[in-house]
Amino acid sequence: MGNLGAPEIILILLVILVLFGAKKIPELAQGLGKGIREFRKASRDIQDEIEHEVTKIDTEAKVQCYFCKASVSKDAKHCPSCGKSLEQPKCTKCGNTNLLGSRFCKECGQKLDE
Ligand SMILES: [Zn+2]
Ligand SMILES: [Zn+2]
């Protein structure tokens, strides 16, 4: 559809008036209003869906840096903001994987590398 300016709309309304008569106008307006409401509802649903998708992608791809709270890629090995390792520290002595930010192994007490 091309751009409809006010003169075109008035012309269309006049044609409708001639074709259907003045009595039909409220009926047509009602139908039009219903159509617009349905269209708005549909576009709102689509918008909701898009927003939902965006937040889903966002939370899937990004994690918060344990140290500086910066948003970093889930696959990043190091935080680009503070440079700290984002991999869970593995104990060199017993091989236990410790929580991010641990300084000592929770299994054997071995000091962990940064
Ligand atoms: Zn950081
Ligand atoms: Zn250990």
Image (cartoon, grey):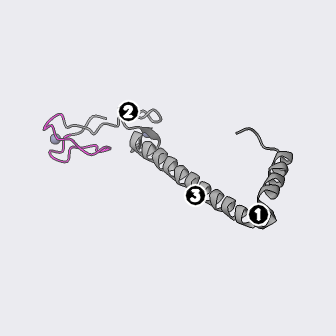
Q: Which residue is drawn at the image coordinates 65% and 57% (left, top)?
A: 36
Kindly report which numbered mark, 2 or 1, lies closer to the viewer in this rendering: 1
**Amino acid at the residue labelled 2:** Ala
The residue that label 3 is drawn on is 41
Q: Look at the image and give the residue range highlighted in magenta.
A: 92-110
Q: Amino acid at mark 1?
A: Ile
Type of secondary structure dominating the magenta stretch:
loop
Q: Nearer the viewer, residue 36 or 30?
A: 30
Residue at which label 2 appears: 76
Q: Which residue is mark 1?
A: 25
Q: Which mark is residue 56?
A: none
In terms of sequence position, does the residue under pointer 3 or pointer 2 come before the other? 3
- The image quadrant of residue 61 is top left
Quarter of the rendering containing residue 75 = top left
Residue 68, by quadrant, is top left
Residue 103 among magenta residues: yes
Residue 72 coordinates in the image, percent (x, y):
43, 38
